Image (spheres, grey):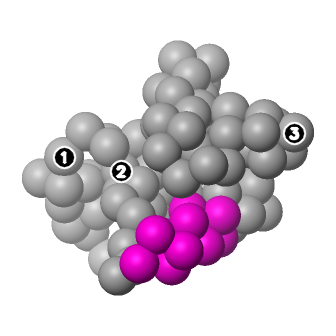
Amino acid sequence: MILIKARTGNKEECYLFDTWEEYFNVFFAPDYTSYFITDFKIDGKTYKERQEYARDLAINFSYADINLSWDELNKVQNKFYAIGKRYGLLREFKENGIC
């Protein structure tokens, strides 16, 4: 799952794609300026690094002012729930309204 916040002209929109191919089909035109892109993959060599990466991803998501439909928001929250559970951040994510 890929989450994008982009601007074309004066219009800002958010998109949720299942594959990178879907993303490239929409964003092939150079009219779009992307502000927030994530594929929800957590990076890092150690558990602590991956935990910090997950925390930073959630913080960046909360600051991105993403406008999604209820269904899309549910998918994103489920993704953050799984990430939070895996890296011991579930309580923190729930307290901050991420999942």
Find residue 17 and report its horizontal and vertical position in percent. Answer: 31, 42
The quadrant in which the C terminus is found is: top right
Residue placed under numbered mark 2 in the picture: 2
Find residue 83 and report its horizontal and vertical position in percent. Answer: 50, 45
* SS of the residue under disc 3: helix
Find residue 53 and report its horizontal and vertical position in percent. Answer: 54, 72
Q: Which mark is residue 95?
A: 3
**Callout 3, which amino acid?**
Glu
Q: Nearer the viewer, residue 15 or 39?
A: 39
Q: Which residues are magenta?
A: 46-56
Identified at 41% across, 41% down, the residue is: 16
Q: Is residue 46 left or right of residue 78?
A: left
Residue placed under numbered mark 1 in the picture: 19
**Callout 2, which amino acid?**
Ile
Would you call the spot at circle 2 few (<14 residues within 10 Å), some (14-19), or many (20 or more)? some
Task: Answer with mark 2 or mark 3, whichever residue precedes in sequence.
Answer: 2
Would you call the spot at circle 1 few (<14 residues within 10 Å), some (14-19), or many (20 or more)? few
Q: Is residue 75 left or right of residue 7?
A: left
Q: Nearer the viewer, residue 41 or 7?
A: 41
- The answer to whether marks 3 and 1 mark residues whose Cβ atoms lie closer than 8 Å is no
Find residue 85 and report its horizontal and vertical position in percent. Answer: 55, 39
* SS of the residue under disc 1: loop
